[in-house]
Image: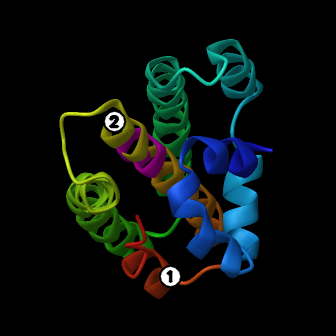
Amino acid sequence: MKVVTACIVVASMCAPALAQQPTSLEREVWRSRTPAYDSCEKKASGVLRAIVDCEAQEFDIQDAKLNRTYRKVIAAIPRARETKLRAAQRSWIRRRDPLCKAAALRQDGSIHTWMYSYLYWSCVTDATIRRTILIERYAAGQASLADLVTDHRS
């Protein structure tokens, strides 16, 4: 499971993460990683630089999925909901990268390490997957606009 691999790579970060039960959304995020990521991670054999490449590749895949999902939902919802979703999405996009950079820096303390790169790419990938799930839920009436506006976990 991805969280186990992440815990091996980032052992010092795991104690707080394991102390809390993951939410259903967090479990869905973990399950949404592609088979290509799992394969890449296995081939990386624990080499952090290679795992960073896996994370970056997975981000590209998940970002493309988010963009497809967003366009599909925008095309299918009423104009009033579309305007609000666009505003919420633009706000989220502006926040995602700075929040992930800050989170990675808090954990690693330096922006010049492979660990920082791993933490950053892992964060933006998970945030992007989470956002796709929330937009899908919003389109299905299972999440509110407030859920999208307050989605700032990174």
Quadrant position of the N terminus in the picture: top right
Q: Quadrant of residue 73?
A: bottom right
Q: Is residue 23 left or right of residue 46?
A: right
Q: Residue at label 2?
A: 117
How many C-alpha atoms fall within 10 Å of the one at disc 1: few (<14), some, or many (≥20)? some
Where residue 118 sits: x, y (%)? 42, 37
65 to 108, vertically: above or below: above
| Relative depth, front residue between 89 and 140 | 89
Name the front one of labels 1 and 2. Answer: 2
Residue in the picture at 66% in, 24% down: 41
Instruction: Compare residues 120 and 63 and report the one nearer the observer.
Output: 120
Q: How many marks?
A: 2
Location of residue 144 in the rendering, given as x and y in whole percent from the top left corner: 55, 84
Please, what is the three-letter code of the amino acid marked with disc 1? Asp
The secondary element bearing badge 2 is classed as helix
Task: Name the spot of residue 139 as percent of width and height, x first.
Answer: 62, 66
| Residue 99 percent coordinates (x, y) | 27, 62
Q: Which mark is residue 121?
A: none
Q: Which residue is mark 1?
A: 147
